[in-house]
Amino acid sequence: MQSGTDAHTPDAVEGLVKKAQEGDAASFAGLYECFYGKVFRYVLFRTGNRVEAEDITEEVFLRMLESITSFKWKGYPFSAWLFRIAHNLVVDHYRKKGRQQAVSLDSATGVAGAPPDVDSELDLKMSLQEVYEAMGGLTKLQREVLTLRFASGLSVLETAQAMGKKENAVKALQHAAVKNLRAILVPRHRLSRESQGRASTMESLS
Amino acid sequence: MNRGRELDDILDDCLERLARGEGVAECVGRYPEHAEELAPLLEVAANTMQVASSVSYTLQAKERGLNRLTSALAQRGASRDRRFLWLAWRPSVVRPLVLGIVAALFATGTAFGTAMASSDSVPGDTLYWVKTKREQISLMLPRSDMDRAHLQIRLARVRGQEMSRLVARHRLPEAELVADRMKRHLNESAVFAGLITPTNPIDMPLLPAELQNRQNVIALMVRLEQDGGFLRVQLLELHRTMSPSERRRLDLLRRRSELAYVTFVSALEHGGSPSWGPLWRTMPPRSRHR
């Protein structure tokens, strides 16, 4: 399992895009390497299903291949354009499936290969599920902002361009999203701690 | 800047710092006046960031996607690269120009294709309006009276062809209506040729200058005789395929059409003769420059 570093400077990305527009296969592979993880995480957080996320992510890059010649450097980053494709494909996916919300992230972790540390993987899974469910309580736009910012690691500018909004609007959405997320997560944590406390008390009593 | 907007910016700055690896305490320390509000938000954000960024993908899936991308690239490569990809690196001025030319050619081609497709249409067909619009436009173009006379004769021939097609489809009532339109075209042609003159010969000479040119008269006559003869042959051929009642109707239609052509030819032939006189008279005099 890989989380990927996706560390490419904007200049490097620009170089790759220009060469890819000329049909350079290695540059396409470079862009794929650079953005695969980010796109996958975005799609996974939107769909909640690993298999679907993998399929849609593949589709995103095929679309990129089809239409990269239409991309122009007009002051907005390539990532914004790419995530717009991802967003549209996720929307199409929901439209085809006829539902608005994915079910769970149960299959999102620990699919391939033996995890190095079973306990930490279990913790991560629980946390991921928790975060995903909590994000389900946000508005669509708030969820989109947090997914692009936290899961895909886009900057505010990139997020704004990908969503077709102004930076200030994205910052406001981000603020409201984090506030709401906290409002959803904190009571659950409290409940969870209380139940854990009760369980340990019962154990010590027995 | 209002307080809400200021907090949006501060939170964003802190989130950027968290993403770069700075701790929550450090970030809060930068904005002590907002510490109380910032700290709980940053804790949630840091936790969410950590969880979200830790989502992993399988190497198999990534490799599968790359293979699919590579094979799609290879498939497209040979043909597309040679034909269209050069547009991507052309100078920014050339590209829109080329695309504009392509679009213009496409639009022209489409218009030409529609016009061609509509040329065989008859009343009641989907594209018939295209044909009639084209004719109306052609009538508006500036021409000499003699050219207009020729154009009206050409339109009369087109109506004759429509009549034949309608008769072949046993749509005789519609063919009769088209025959009326054909006669109107011939009538218009006669106006432009100068055969229809005002009743007062002082206002207007019996024959306009153009018609006094024998070459023009012969050209019109040849054309009319050809078209009239062709229409006659077509309608006679269709006669055999008709039922007895249709035949009677078709015979009448053919004779009337023939008469329109014959009368026009005769008027041209004897136009200079004082015994013939004008073919039709109109009152008040109509302008020939419409």
Image (cartoon, rainbow, N blue to C red):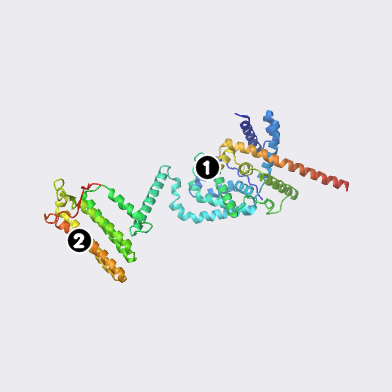
- Residue B262: image tag: 2
* Left or right of residue B5, residue A130 in this image: right
Judge from the rendering whether residue B106 lies leftward or rightward of residue A42; answer left or right: left
Chain letter of the residue carrying label 2: B
Q: Where is residue B83 in the image (x, y as percent from the top left)?
A: 43, 52
- Chain under callout 1: A
Residue B205: % across, % down: 14, 48
For the residue marked with disc 1, what is the amino acid?
A: Glu
Disc 2, SS? helix
Of residue B162 and residue A107, the one placed in the foreground of this image is B162
Instruction: Answer whether residue A30 is visible to the viewer in this image.
Output: no
State the image coordinates of residue B121 (x, y, percent, origin top left). Answer: 34, 59
Q: In which quarter of the image is residue B118?
A: bottom left
Q: In this view, does B21 lie above or below B247?
A: above
**Quadrant into which the N terminus of chain B falls:** top right
Residue B74: image x %, image y %? Answer: 51, 55
Residue drawn at 62 percent across, 52 percent down: A99
Q: Report the Cα–Cα distance between label 2 and label 1.
A: 78 Å
Q: Residue A14 carries which label?
A: 1
Give the residue drawn at x 21%, y 54%.
Answer: B190
Q: In which quarter of the image is residue B275?
A: bottom left
**What residue is at 88 percent from the left and 46 percent from the top?**
A205
Q: Left or right? Give the position of B106 relative to A105.
A: left
Q: Residues within 10 Å of mark 2 (few under 14, many from 20)?
A: some
Residue B32 can be seen in this image: yes
Mark 1, secondary structure of its residue: helix
Front: mark 2 or 1: 2
Kind of residue sitting beneath label 2:
Val
